[in-house]
Image: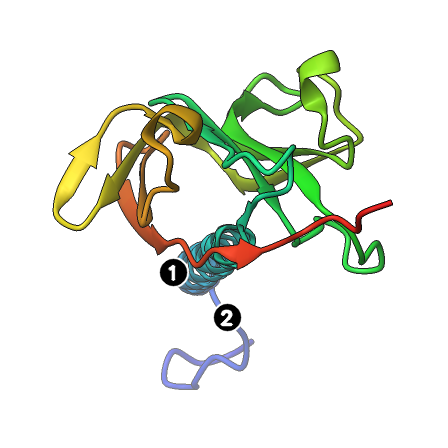
Amino acid sequence: MRSSGQASAGFTLLELVVAIGLTSLLTVVAYSSLNISLKAVGRGQVAAERLQELRVGQNILDRSLSSTVRGSLADKIYFIGDPRQMRFFTLEPLEAYNLGGVYHWRVLLGQDEAGNGVLAVEQTKNVNWYRDPEGVEVRQIIISGVAEAHFTYGTGGDEFENWDAKKVRSLPEWVKVNLTFNNQQSLVLMIPIHVAEFRPKQR
């Protein structure tokens, strides 16, 4: 028989319950901290991917508009723009391996397969697009998650909602693209136009 003055060699039930409770509490705290850290990392990764997509999308528009062509359709200047879309000829193909020639581009607010708004480019190499105005050979989404897109066109300090180069007899000097995303954030892209001269070979 053990005397009352002798120290206990084991744990009592109360001590065991307290130890399990403290362990559980520490586990919950550690899990919560890890979960918050993982969510922060995930948000940072999404933000970085989003920023990269915006940079690539703007770069595509910059390159295409920087090589806008005049004199490629019966020696007529061609550029048609309204608040919802713009059409123009460019020397810049969507697919890097498909170099050479003039391409008809249409930039517009479209939808992806899930029905979400996107800024998209439709391309055809058929410069005589009047015969098939809706013809598309290549379609590419350049910016996703777009709720609204609004295009305006200008020369100098003057800004216009519509531009028809055939009537104005010149191309715009710049295009402004106003984008509103699904999270209500907005972005304005100012893109200058540098005209490329193109003369088809005379047969």
Horizontal placement of 28 versus 157: left or right? right
Total labels: the figure holds: 2
Mark 2, other Cα within 10 Å: few <14 / some 14–19 / many ≥20 = few
Using the rendered view, name the quadrant where residue 85 is placed.
top left
Residue at image coords 80%, 56%: 100
As rendered, which of 22 and 180 lies closer to the eye? 180
Residue 79 at what x, y percent from top left? 47, 33
Q: How is the image coloured?
A: rainbow
Residue 28 in sight from this viewpoint: no
Which residue appears farthest toward the left when viewing the image?
Answer: 157
Which residue appears farthest toward the front when viewing the image?
Answer: 203
Residue at image coords 62%, 25%: 112
Mark 1, other Cα within 10 Å: few <14 / some 14–19 / many ≥20 = few
Residue 106 in sight from this viewpoint: yes
Residue at image coords 77%, 37%: 125
Residue 142 at what x, y percent from top left? 57, 43
Tag 2 residue: 11
As rendered, which of 94 and 153 lies closer to the eye? 153
For badge 2, the amino acid type reads: Phe
Residue 44 at what x, y percent from top left? 43, 61
Residue 139 at what x, y percent from top left? 71, 33
Q: Of helix, strand and loop, which one carries label 1?
A: helix
Q: Give the mark nearest the N terminus, 1 or 2.
A: 2
For badge 1, the amino acid type reads: Val
Tag 1 residue: 29
